[in-house]
Amino acid sequence: MNVGMLKDQELILRYLDGDDKSFEILLNRHRDKIYTSIYLFVKNRDMANDIFQDVFIKIIDTLRKGKYNHEGKFLQWAMRISYNMCVDNFRRSKRRTKVSPSETFDIFDVLENKDENMEETMIKNQLSVRIKSLVDQLPPEQREVVILRHYADMSFKEISQLTRVSINTALGRMRYALINMRKMVGDKELLIS
């Protein structure tokens, strides 16, 4: 049997039985989503790398202690750990950072890039910078929901549990985020014309 085809839970059980390769497969399977969501919260590559490593140290520690809850999905559990570590980081620093155009991270770096020509790549990069700029201008609660929904691919139910608000509140925050982003785009178009 191909180990890469095993479900997350099976990989965890194999890892706990001493198969380190199984954890490596699990890490590689979910690394991009977890790292991207961390980066979008902290807006700093070095800090994101540090938090990402801390997340996986905590995951390994929790697995080895036998405290992993098998009822939930691994990715959502790992996302909750990363979210909590990002919140802890914000509490410690008491400030939020902004994305600057000079930063080299691009969300499309972690997505598959199949047979794109240079023009398509340039358009995606420009669009990515614009979207990150719009998301960064949102109020923190709205930005959080957009990141969790679109970059971490979480359901509104998972978002509501993670952020400890009702599903309706999470949906409302997404609605207002989209309204605000449309307004920002409209305002910029008016300035250009």
Image (tube, rainbow, N blue to C red):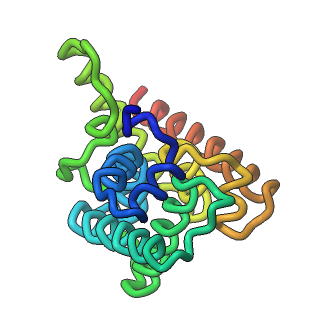
State left or right for residue 21 relative to residue 130: left
Question: Which quadrant is the C terminus positioned in?
Answer: top left
State left or right for residue 164 relative to residue 136: right
Residue 156 in picture, x, y percent from top left: 70, 49
Looking at this view, is 21 or 168 the one in front?
21
Residue at left offset 31%, top offset 35% = 108
Q: Can residue 133 be seen here?
A: no
Residue 163 in picture, x, y percent from top left: 65, 67
Residue 22 in picture, x, y percent from top left: 35, 51
Which residue, as the protein is rendered here, is positioned at the far bottom?
92
Residue at left offset 25%, top offset 64% = 49
Looking at this view, is 131 or 183 the one in front?
131
Looking at this view, is 10 or 153 the one in front?
10
Residue at left offset 62%, top offset 42% = 178
Q: Can residue 147 be seen here?
A: yes
State left or right for residue 31 relative to residue 47: right
Residue at left offset 42%, top offset 62% = 41
* Image position of 73 with respect to 122: above or below: below
Residue 85 position by quadrant:
bottom left
Looking at this view, is 110 or 16 the one in front?
16
Question: Which quadrant is the N terminus positioned in?
Answer: top left
Residue 131 position by quadrant:
top left
* Image position of 94 with respect to 135: above or below: below
The number of discs equals: 0
* Image position of 2 with respect to 142: above or below: above
Residue 51 position by quadrant:
bottom left
Residue 8 in picture, x, y percent from top left: 50, 48
State left or right for residue 179 relative to residue 59: right
